[in-house]
Amino acid sequence: MSTPSTRVEVLLVLALLSCSPGIVWSNTLCQQTNDQVRPHSVSITEFGAVGDGVTLNTKAFQNAIFYLNSFADKGGAKLFVPAGRWLTGSFDLISHLTLWLDKDAVILGSTNPEDWPVVDPLPSYGRGRELPGRRHKSLVYGRNLTDVIITGNNGTIDGQGSIWWSMFRNNTLDYTRPHLIELINSTGVLISNLTLLNSPFWTVHPVYCSHVTVQKVAIFAPLDSPNTDGIDPDSSDNVCIEDCYISTGDDLIAIKSGWDEYGIAYSRPCTNIVIHRLVGKTQTSAGIAIGSEMSGGVSEVHVEDVQFYDSNTAIRIKTSPGRGGYVRNIYVSNVTLTNVDIAIRFTGLYGEHPDDAYDPNALPVIEKITIKDVVGENIKTAGLIEGIEGDNFVNVCLSNIVLNVSSNYPWNCSYVKGYSDLVLPEACEPLKERIFPEHCSDCYYMSNQIQSSKSQNRAGQRNFR
């Protein structure tokens, strides 16, 4: 026989379900890929490449891609990389190209920094992320491209980043370290069926891009390697990341949009970001992070069906006075955690500024953050949610969260306002007010327009008649 308290919880769950819309738009977005057959194909060996792991093949990659550019207006072309270990420095992609890595094919980044040219900083950062001035070009690089595919039969791209990590630790870098893959101002990008190893810096960095899909990619770097983020969508829109495994030395996914006054001036947000079925671990950072560089704004982020284990933090928002911008309309659901230090963490005083010209009065707007359907075992702290004095983070909504927490003080919250239902351990005081029935509309993706939802259902039924 059910107790009165049990019946109340069942009714509350039913009520919360009525807050939720019936259609998840992210499913359709993630199905938009451009995996297509190219009418022209060449092998890297046709251009003199030697896959012995010793011979430098930069010229072979550059010459092959230069040749394939003649097919860009004829349906595009494929550059085939067969089994072998293909050492190379940085090379540029072109539009309407498929870079295909066969099984047992490994593209190796050169361990000579001179094989990674130096390029201008991104305008939304104003300088290199680590050092003032310019930065090294990524191993696989492209800008102003359309219809680019990097894929294969689970081939590998290995940045051999240890030399770069050593220079960082020894303070001997002359310029900011390179990414493994960076695409700038490009559209129609597919990265799939690959293993990516040992990036010198961030691993996959689409910046100022539209319609980017990353699917079935495994990313590895040592857990103590510095700043080896997995996938960092940056001032980009319509990005789908799904069915990936990531284990690195920093954030597994970090959503960004520019740094302080430079990001504010460039003003390109990161929006419509979908993350599905991600598994991974990071001992130093977060599974899903937003920021800390978010000055152009971040919005409409949907994260669903993710698992993090043996990690420092699961979900994190990082910002600071001086960032400006906003983080809003964030939806995270179906999260499974095991052996995680902090389940949910918001940091309002992250610091790190590009120079002294930032405006300390440029305060970020953090609002409408929904986190629901989370379970966790062996969690140290449920939430460390720290806003900014005079700039509260608002409409933070937590629903159906059950965490097995070891700390006697599971929540620590300041300068935040929001709502919660069915949260164990019980949420901190600023989040204790219930979502249902008054605050569904205050919580992103939990609308209380029940009548509107019914109307949509009736319209859908008419469409099937």
Image: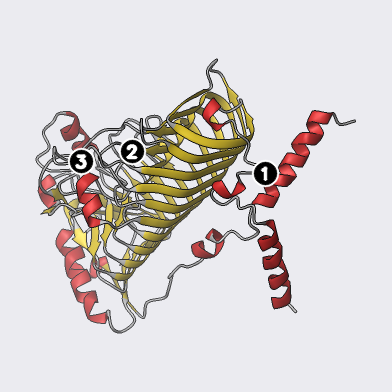
Left or right, 404 with respect to 201, comes to right
Q: Earlier in the sequence, mark 2 or mark 3?
A: 2
**Callout 2 environment at 10 Å: few (<14), some (14 to 19), or many (20+)?**
many
- Which of the image's four quarters has the N terminus? top right
Find numbered disc 3 in the image and state the secondary structure of the residue it sits on: loop
Hey, what amino acid is under mark 1? Pro
Q: Is residue 397 above or below residue 338?
A: below
Q: Which mark is residue 319?
A: 2
Q: Which residue is mark 1?
A: 437
Left or right, 357 with respect to 392, comes to left
- Which of the image's four quarters has the C terminus? bottom right
Residue 276 picture location, percent across and down:
52, 52
Q: Which residue is mark 3?
A: 359
Would residue 109 be visible to someone looking at this image? Answer: no
Question: Number of callouts in the render?
Answer: 3
Q: In 3D space, how far apart are the residues under numbered discs 1 and 2 (Cα atoms)? A: 31 Å
Q: Earlier in the sequence, mark 1 or mark 2?
A: 2
Q: Quadrant of residue 60?
A: bottom left
**Callout 3 environment at 10 Å: few (<14), some (14 to 19), or many (20+)?**
few
Residue 302 picture location, percent across and down:
50, 52
Query: Among all residues in the image, which is located at the extreme right?
Result: 1
Residue 223 picture location, percent across and down:
36, 32
Q: Nearer the viewer, mark 2 or mark 3?
A: 3
